[in-house]
Image (cartoon, coloured by chain):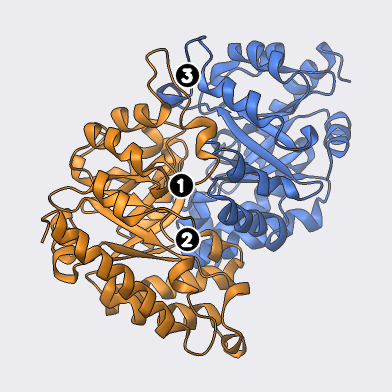
Chain colours: A blue, B orange
């Protein structure tokens, strides 16, 4: 998958929504728990219900690893289910990996060869050789943490040098030359939407993955106002607010309804900023 | 496991060696490849051969995830093998995880509840709420990345504020108050041994996990000179240089020999600095 494929999908579906599959067992609708594979069944229903309104899915690895082999099995079957049934969907491993070169190479193989992900989120702390192995795969993407949506973002990401340049700016400035610009995206939390003005000065065209709309309280309108490019340039993630919108037998309809509501708002913004 | 248990083991085995189980399929001795479970068989032989000289084992998650379900199965069986046969051994998940609070909580459950690890390596970029969920488990440890052993460490870890304080120092200063000091350790690469002087001013008693001796070229003597405390305070990791010391049917003897050689050098240093 390349950037053009992603942009085409955004224009066709009139959406830049990513649904985060943070499929926590304890939050599943009760009636699913008697199934043999509650999480996989839940994911299939959520995927089918929300795919018409979404351009990306993003399984969050922690929610699968926490259930060991069973969880990893659910992850594998979920990503193959998406790739087979919805090959146009951009598939992101939310894994926040990053290690010395020879180890990052193995993580890249885990997500890009062993599994058919299109992108993986990577933490920048260990620098260039922890990130570049992920960039050695054509038509695959690194989504590097820049300014995250959580409270702890303030601890180190704003740590600034003598020119008042914060760390997240240094991360973007340095990393954008580490590989083909087409294959790097950045995580910028919706809870920090006003910072998008500064970030767009550094990376006017790169795609940004934006978490924090929904359960974390960020505003979609602000994100579009400060971050949208002529090709959209945004993939906005919602996890809990979509997948746990309902908790009964009609949970997938509730998820579809929430995704459709976000898509409708996104369509208005895509028109407002003349992407479509 | 608590710090006293670790210190007792160091004094008893006269060693502060951690063996990194970076068990890459492509590097295994050829005769193992015909076995049904080459990596698990390799790990068992390496563990049995090196346990007398080691106080910790550290599976590197990337080398298991890169083989999907089969790899995760090898990881599980390896850690249970260690916990049952060598319950005194400190068991580290080298995972470099870190995410927003509710996600880090799931990672902590993956390593501390679903699997019986004693410690997990964590990346600090996302700040306090990405680290503290790992600190909510008694007798479990967070090993936070501070100054890593790879070339890329220079990219952001030395990024300094107007008082010339580098990021890795800020990480140590801030994080040491995030939980019981007993339950936080730091990663400091052996390739940056001289920096241990400054780090010991900040955390005079915390344990440090030191990679980079062996294949990456760091010096054990320098690490001890600048980093050792009265309780040792060091766990030095060697991965490839030990586990791939030999490549034939006698690979486990070669690994034992390399581990014993490091233990011998460590015993001399423990005596020199009056830990034993």
Question: What is the secondary structure assignment of the residue under circle 2?
Answer: loop
Quick one: A215 or B141, which is closer to the camera?
B141
Quadrant for the N terminus of chain A in the image: top right
Question: What is the secondary structure assignment of the residue under circle 1?
Answer: loop
What is the spatial separation of the Cα atoms under label 3 and label 2, in whole angstroms? 30 Å
Asked if A258 appears above or below B49 in the picture, the reply is above
User: Which subunit holds the residue at mark 2?
Assistant: B
For residue A158, the mark is: 3
Rendered residue at 46%/35% (across/down) = B100
N-term-proximal mark, 1 vs 2:
2
Rendered residue at 52%/9% (across/down) = A163
**Residue A130 in which image quadrant:** top right
The residue wearing badge 2 is B60
User: Which subunit holds the residue at mark 3?
Assistant: A
User: Which subunit holds the residue at mark 1?
Assistant: B
Q: Position of residue B51 (x, y in %)?
A: 30, 76
The residue wearing badge 1 is B149
Is label 3 in contact with label 1 (beta carbons under 8 Å)? no
Quick one: B124 or B163, which is closer to the camera?
B163
Q: Badge 3: few (under 14), some or many (20 or more) residues near its Cα, within 10 Å?
A: some
Question: What is the secondary structure assignment of the residue under circle 3?
Answer: loop
């Amino acid at each position: 998958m390349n950037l053009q494929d992603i942009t085409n999908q955004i224009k066709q579906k009139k959406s830049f929504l990513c649904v985060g599959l943070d499929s926590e067992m304890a939050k599943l609708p009760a009636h699913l728990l008697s199934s043999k594979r509650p999480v996989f069944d839940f994911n299939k229903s959520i995927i089918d219900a929300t795919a018409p309104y979404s351009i990306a899915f993003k399984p969050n690895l922690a929610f699968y690893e926490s259930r060991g082999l069973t969880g990893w099995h659910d992850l594998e079957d979920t990503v193959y289910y998406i790739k087979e049934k919805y090959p146009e969907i951009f598939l992101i491993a939310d894994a926040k990996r990053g290690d010395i070169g020879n180890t990052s190479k193995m993580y890249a193989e885990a997500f890009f060869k062993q599994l058919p992900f299109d992108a993986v989120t990577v933490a920048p702390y260990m620098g260039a050789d922890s990130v570049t192995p992920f960039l050695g795969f054509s038509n695959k993407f690194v989504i590097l943490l820049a300014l995250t949506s959580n409270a702890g973002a303030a601890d180190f990401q704003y740590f600034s040098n003598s020119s008042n340049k914060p760390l997240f700016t240094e991360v973007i400035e340095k990393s954008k030359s580490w590989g083909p610009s087409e294959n790097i995206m950045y995580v910028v939390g919706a809870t920090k939407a006003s910072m998008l003005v500064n970030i767009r000065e550094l990376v006017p065209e790169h795609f940004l993955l934006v978490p924090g709309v929904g359960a974390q309280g960020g505003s979609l309108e602000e994100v579009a106002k400060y971050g949208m490019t002529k090709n959209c340039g945004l993939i906005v993630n919602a996890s809990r607010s979509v997948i746990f919108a309902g908790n009964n037998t009609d949970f997938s309809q509730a998820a579809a309804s929430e995704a459709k509501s976000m898509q409708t708002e996104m369509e208005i913004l895509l028109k407002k900023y003349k992407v479509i």
